[in-house]
Amino acid sequence: MITISEQAQQHFAKLLAKQPEGTHIRVFVVNPGTAQAECGVSYCPPDAVEDSDLMLDFTGFNAVVDNESQPFLVDAEIDFVTDQMGSQLTLKAPNAKVRKVSDNAPLLERVQYVIDSEINPQLANHGGRVSVMELTNDGVAVLQFGGGCNGCSQVDLTLKEGIEKELLNRFSGELSGVRDITEHQRGEHSYY
């Protein structure tokens, strides 16, 4: 579930050696599955461990993950990096904002996952977003744009050269194309 590098394990072991006996680290996600999701690490005294928590064994310590955070910490990585600027603990959780779906989930869920985890973060830089509204019987993903994408003069380029190419590459043999059903209206909300 969570990978903790050797350097990070040594760092946590040193920190925990100064804490009361039996203290663990807790890895968690605040607002999991939302655009505001943030990951964190904190001390976890023994009396703060819940029955539903997942206990992960590492060298010299245990990491505790609450039940709600577990699916959003799949493939998470914690590292401790030292460079010319000093030392820094890094936590990468690619599924914190969007719950990872299994490879055998329905196609609609897998397509929406790719959109939510990879495409929407890029569109958000311009105030936009996109959602899958349906999948047709002939394999076309019907999309709806919103935010800054609604009325944007570059939406056709984004759709065909960006989103469609990525989705057709990812779901080769399952998707045949994409179609935009947004009624684009120009206005102050759009970027030109």
Image (cartoon, rainbow, N blue to C red):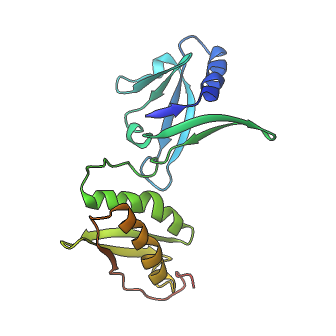
Q: Is residue 23 above or below residue 137?
A: above
Residue sitting at the far bottom? 186
The single residue placed furthest to the front in the displayed view is 173
Left or right of 124: which side holds 69?
left
Q: Nearer the viewer, residue 134 or 158?
A: 158
Quadrant (top left, top right, bottom left, bottom right) of the C terminus: bottom right
Instruction: Please say whether residue 119 is visible from this viewpoint.
Output: yes
> What is the x, y in percent for residue 39?
53, 42
Above or below, 47 relative to 181: above
- Tell me if 86 is positioned left or right of 159 in this view: right
| Coordinates of residue 101 in the picture (x, y in percent) | 33, 49
Horizontal arrangement in the rendering, residue 80 relative to residue 2 (left or right): right
Q: Residue at x 49, y 49 (%)?
A: 37
> Looking at the image, which residue sits at the far top?
21
Badge count: 0
**Vertical position of residue 172 compared to residue 73: above or below:** below
Residue 72 % position (x, y) = 42, 43
Asked whether, in this view, residue 144 is left or right of residue 56, the answer is left
The residue drawn where x is 38% and y is 61% is: 170
Look at 30% across and 49% down and name the residue there. Answer: 103
- Across and down, in percent, residue 102 comes to 31, 47
| Residue 12 to residue 92: above or below | above
Residue 87, visible in the rendered structure = no
Relative depth, front residue between 31 and 97: 97
- Name the residue: 42% across, 40% down: 74
Q: Which quarter of the image is occupied by the N terminus?
A: top left
Extreme residue toward the right, this view:
84
